[in-house]
Amino acid sequence: MKNFLNKKVNYINSALKEFLPKDNSIISKGMRYSVLAGGKRLRPIFLILSAELFGGKSHDVLPAACAIEYIHTYSLIHDDLPAMDNDDWRRGIPTNHKKFGEAVAILCGDALLTESFSLILKSKSSPKNINEAIRILSNYAGYRGMIMGQVKDTLLIKDLYNNSTKMFLKRKLKLIQIQKTSALIIASLRMGAILAGADKNSLQILETYGTDIGIAFQITDDILDVYGNENFFNEKSNDLKNKKLTALSLYGKKNATKKAYEYIEKAKKAISVFGSKSKIFIRIAEHIIDMTH
Amino acid sequence: MKNFLNKKVNYINSALKEFLPKDNSIISKGMRYSVLAGGKRLRPIFLILSAELFGGKSHDVLPAACAIEYIHTYSLIHDDLPAMDNDDWRRGIPTNHKKFGEAVAILCGDALLTESFSLILKSKSSPKNINEAIRILSNYAGYRGMIMGQVKDTLLIKDLYNNSTKMFLKRKLKLIQIQKTSALIIASLRMGAILAGADKNSLQILETYGTDIGIAFQITDDILDVYGNENFFNEKSNDLKNKKLTALSLYGKKNATKKAYEYIEKAKKAISVFGSKSKIFIRIAEHIIDMTH
């Protein structure tokens, strides 16, 4: 499995290097710096596998796969900004704004977001399918999806906890997880499928799989975030009011982990209707907890 | 002329209101706040007129026209941020980040940029033409165009002036003007034309017209920026090293104004090959200096 994923990652990294601007302007340097800083390339892998599931060729959808990685990278650059999460480090190197300054970081994010849409156009599919892929990306990455998740994640740290029942918080958390993390995974799966000409019924199955995988991924990520930083954990883990609404803060470590595994099982069950073709999706689902490390 | 433009502005404003999200989330409020804060709607007007020039109907390209206004608005929201131009006021009301905070302003800009691409898809044209319109917007608004202009405009205030000949600065200034301002005007003209099925030769004429109109517009805007703010003018107008590279700082007011009129004449000459159909474009060119007020 690790070998399989490594091969895919190398394939995607080569394509990213090819598509990224090569000039020496500070904006192009900034785009390359953050996109090529590493990463699991989970979203482009999903896009390619989804296209292959419906008979598409990986090479034909490679531009769209890279486009979704541009979107993921832009969201990280903007999330790391001082006005947002204010992070200095990302993937072992200084964040974009620490390296290039805030103005460049904002513009690098804007440039990646803008460029992603012309990159999709380089995919080999009908103009109609390409338009549909653009609609999917714009919808799931936009204010109805990923951006809305980010807004809630950034703003609703304390406010949510006053006068809220646990049932309300659980529902709220699930929506944040879906918008913040599942949205772009669903977009990847749907885009790959659409570019390969999949039918509507199949799209719904991918939607379920992507939703559950996204939630499992986000739960694991939240747990690691805290357990990877002892100070934060020791200081704040028991103070719900000073923290973000996450599976860890709401359920505790043991139950949150249990939830992650439940969602993985749900995802596996949903995708299994594709029979033998669903094997790789099932293996990735089982692997998702390792992939957050 | 004013009546004609006012009608168009009202038409576009109604469409913007219809297309903008209507929910009560802070991100949707922020999007509406900045898009509906007023403005000349120059870019959507150009997009519609350009479509009409080639037999297109304004209603068919209205979504694309609104999409380009989304792009223009997002660029203003991000430009106004503290890390960029740090402006507190825009169109007589507090800037987006002054009203909603920096995090929301960054995300509102991202949302408008993302949404603009699914908005274009609502235009009535062939999937192929719509693909091409998306390619144009992404290219002219991205790191090759508007964003690059913004990078240069933000960063190169002092650095440019050391060891630079006036000839070098003149060339540099023209490039900044084209990228920062002409790019989105050219995109508007090209998108309207493509959606209405224009030929390649016509696109080149629109490119010339848009380039020159953009430069004239930017020169006038730079002059007004300074003359509308006496303190800035009195303090810094003679200190080239502390200012941005603009037509005003490089040529002085009299010669900059002369240059603006020269570009207007060039634009009028270029567009006049379309004969009687070019009348409205010629009148807008003559009106462009008033439109910056």
Image (tube, coloured by chain):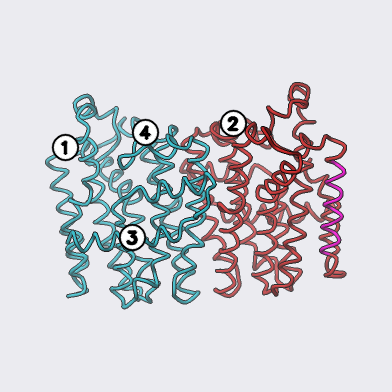
Chain colours: A red, B cyan
Residue to which mark 1 is pinned: B252
Mark 2 residue element: loop
Magenta stretch, main secondary structure, is helix
Q: Nearer the viewer, residue B35 or B222?
A: B35
Q: Are marks 3 and 2 in contact (CB under 8 Å)?
A: no
Mark 4 residue element: loop
Q: Amino acid at mark 2?
A: Asn
Residue to which mark 2 is pinned: A86
Residue A39 painted magenta: no
Tag 1 and tag 2 share a subunit: no
User: Residue B64: image x %, image y %?
Assistant: 41, 64
Looking at marks 3 and 4 on the same chain, the residue that comes earlier in the sequence is marked by: 4
Tag 4 and tag 1 share a subunit: yes
* Magenta stretch bounds: A257-271
Q: Are marks 4 and 1 in contact (CB under 8 Å)?
A: no
Distance CA(mark 1)–CA(mark 2): 42 Å
Q: Which residue is depicted at the point 26% across and 36% down?
A: B165
Q: Is residue A253 left or right of residue A67?
A: right
Mark 1 residue element: loop
Q: The residue marked by circle 4 belongs to what chain? A: B
Q: Which residue is depicted at the point 44% across and 58% down?
A: B139
Mark count: 4
